[in-house]
């Protein structure tokens, strides 16, 4: 797995006139390079996230200022989507490690 931190210009509020730098996390795994066939990848996703009776839904913020999702000036060219749960856990652990090492900057 490879995790890259980069920046992209974007907006987070409805009234923001100019785009400012936003943090973007790029995660690539061995499964992304084509070493796993699509059927195997689908099986891994289903095993990692079994169906639930009441799946989570997107809830409106009802905020007159913040956007529900960040709007980037240049949309990413790669595949965007949900990460597998174990990949999410590793990314969160890396962020927590950075925060613990650099408490003033994290």
Image (cartoon, rainbow, N blue to C red):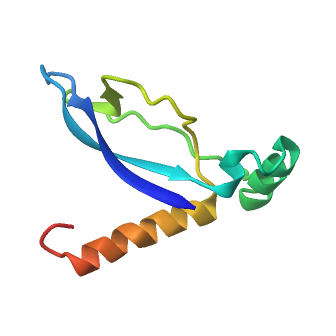
- The residue sitting at 52% across, 59% down in the picture is 2
Where is residue 44 drawn, in percent x and y?
Answer: 79, 56
- The tally of labels here is 0
Q: Is residue 15 above or below residue 104?
A: above
Q: Quadrant of residue 69?
A: top left
- The residue sitting at 79% across, 52% down in the picture is 46
- Quadrant containing the N terminus is bottom right
| Left-right relation of 101 to 49 | left
Q: Quadrant of residue 57?
A: top right
Where is residue 39 drawn, in percent x and y?
Answer: 87, 44
Q: Is residue 63 above or below residue 4?
A: above
| Left-right relation of 38 to 80 | right
- The residue sitting at 84% across, 45% down in the picture is 37
From this viewpoint, which residue is outermost toward the bottom?
Answer: 101
Where is residue 67 drawn, in percent x and y?
Answer: 29, 30
| Left-right relation of 56 to 101 | right
Q: Quadrant of residue 15?
A: top left
Q: Is residue 52 above or below residue 18?
A: below
Identify which residue, 21 or 45, lies in the foreground.
21
From this viewpoint, which residue is outermost toward the right?
Answer: 39
Q: Is residue 90 above or below residue 35?
A: below
| Left-right relation of 44 to 20 | right
- The residue sitting at 57% across, 40% down in the picture is 81
- Quadrant containing the C terminus is bottom left
Identify which residue, 68 or 90, lies in the foreground.
90
Identify which residue, 98 or 36, lies in the foreground.
36
Identify which residue, 19 or 36, lies in the foreground.
36
């Amino acid at each position: 797995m490879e995790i890259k931190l980069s920046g992209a210009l974007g907006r987070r509020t409805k009234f923001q006139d100019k785009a400012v730098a936003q943090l973007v996390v790029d995660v690539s795994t061995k499964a992304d390079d084509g070493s796993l066939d699509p059927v195997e990848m689908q099986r891994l996703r289903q095993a990692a996230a079994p169906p639930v009776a009441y799946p989570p839904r997107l809830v409106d913020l009802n905020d007159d200022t913040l956007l529900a999702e960040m709007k980037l000036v240049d949309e990413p060219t790669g595949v965007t989507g949900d990460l597998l749960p174990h990949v999410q856990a590793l990314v969160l652990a890396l962020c927590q490690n950075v925060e613990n090492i650099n408490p003033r900057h994290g």
